[in-house]
Amino acid sequence: MDSALGSSTIDELMERACQHVAAAEYFDAERVCTRCLRGSRSNLDFERMARIVLPLQEARRQRRVAALDAGMVAVVRTRHDLPRPLAAGCYLLKPPMIGRDGTSLRETLNRRGIPASVLTREPLTRMGKWPIVGVGPMVVRTQVEPPWPVARDETSPSKDTDTRLPPLEWFARASEALGDVAIAALAPGDHPHYRVDDLLDFLEAHPEHEKLHQELERACRAAIGTAEPTLPRRRGIEDPNSF
């Protein structure tokens, strides 16, 4: 958490973030918003957090749209499969690469200002589905249908040897499904502060989901004026090092 930021500093930074959005400087806007969001959480300033979420959501939405509009799809099994140089588009990582590799690639693309949608899949299940995973402070995982029927191959790390490039429509559906399962994992009876924290963690794992941002904005507003929790926090969420 960026606890060094005072309210006036956050307001000044958010004016700058809105200027970045207006100028279509979406990566700069995202970086400023993320910093302000952390600072406001450290200050227990949920009202400011709620206001920060909206420009953050817009910056990320524009980044995702640019990634899909680029029309490039890459399936990445090893680093050698990455395009050189890295390009805007959609990246599907598959075993032997893991969820943390997807997070690392997304961060690299963001630092370089390259709009991209990044998903990581795990081995084909016996039911013929692809588990999709996002890794941050917490793990988000769901199973989706592949774009087409896939034959199982026990000798492959991904349990299939399919080399076809998924269509852009599949990327959009899989990304939506991953964020939806994160929202469904929220515990309704949790303290409002804990609900905010879970959503912040989920967004680190999967920052491309608009409804997660909307849910965070609602959770921040619900937390305004509430006392800090006194009971220890318990999370029934998967450990990020569990795979």
Image (cartoon, rainbow, N blue to C red):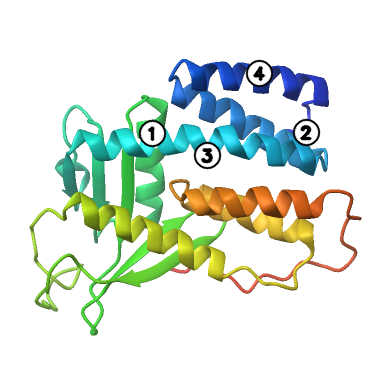
- Which of labels 1 and 2 is toward the front? 1
User: Which residue is situated farthest in the bottom direction here?
Assistant: 126
Picture residue at 46% right of the left edge, 15% below the top: 23
Secondary structure category for the residue under label 2 = loop
**Which of 57 and 108 lies nearest the eye of the viewer?**
57
Q: Amino acid at mark 1?
A: Arg
Q: Is residue 66 left or right of residue 26?
A: left
Q: Residues within 10 Å of mark 4 (few under 14, many from 20)?
A: few
Secondary structure category for the residue under label 4 = helix
| Distance from Cα at disc 2 to Cα at disc 3 | 22 Å
Residue that mark 4 sits on: 15
Residue that mark 2 sits on: 3
Question: Does the CB distance between marks 1 and 2 fall below 8 Å?
Answer: no
Secondary structure category for the residue under label 1 = helix
| Distance from Cα at disc 1 to Cα at disc 2 | 28 Å
Q: Position of residue 135 (x, y in %)?
A: 46, 56
Specify the label residue 57 is tagged with. 3
Q: Position of residue 9 (x, y in %)?
A: 76, 19
Q: Does the image show residue 1?
A: no
**Which of 197 and 102 lies nearest the eye of the viewer?**
197
| Distance from Cα at disc 3 to Cα at disc 1 | 10 Å
Q: Quadrant of the C terminus?
A: bottom left
